[in-house]
Image (cartoon, helix red, strand yellow):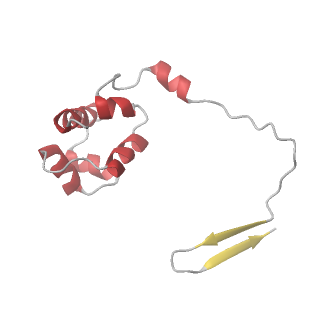
Amino acid sequence: MLNTVAFINRLKQIMEHHQFSASSFADKVGVQRSSISHILSGRNKPSLDFVLKINTVFNDLDLEWLLNGTGSYPKSQDEFSNSGTTIKNTSKSKKEIQRIVTFYTDGTFEEFIK
């Protein structure tokens, strides 16, 4: 179970570290300003979507620290270097794109054929 008061304190720590006001933090994360206000006041609990948006926006954030307070904030430089794994393509096949289909929200689509 998430300790809401401790989560709010960690959220404030992130905002102070990056020098964000509540409204600028909301804009950066991509949520409504009222959502931040309600969470900071303790009126609402943070949703999973809200937590994931924060985790996506701030690379120096450890999700375990945000949720449980374990670890440190910001991440140490060692943690950054370990997270950047290199992916090597070992496939020897010569794959080529034949066509690309883009679907739009209005139900239309566009097809690109090589």
Location of residue 31 by image quarter: bottom left
Image quarter hosting the N terminus: top left
Q: Nearer the viewer, residue 70 or 74?
A: 70
What residue is drawn where x is 16% and y is 36%? 5
Q: Can residue 29 be seen in this snapshot?
A: no
Residue 59, given in percent of the width and then of the height, sits at 43, 35
Image quarter hosting the C terminus: bottom right
Q: Would residue 103 appear left or right of 50 to someone viewing this image?
A: right
| Count of labels in the image | 0
Q: Would residue 64 appear left or right of 14 to someone viewing this image?
A: right
What residue is drawn where x is 40% and y is 43%? 57
Tell me if residue 43 comes above or below residue 76 in the rendering.
below
Q: Can residue 67 be seen in this snapshot?
A: yes
Tell me if residue 12 comes above or below residue 35 in the rendering.
above
Residue 51, given in percent of the width and then of the height, sits at 34, 44
Residue 91, given in percent of the width and then of the height, sits at 82, 41
Q: Nearer the viewer, residue 1 or 107?
A: 1
Q: Would residue 63 appear left or right of 3 to someone viewing this image?
A: right
What residue is drawn where x is 39% and y is 38%? 58
Q: Would residue 103 appear left or right of 100 to someone viewing this image?
A: left
Residue 14, given in percent of the width and then of the height, sits at 28, 34
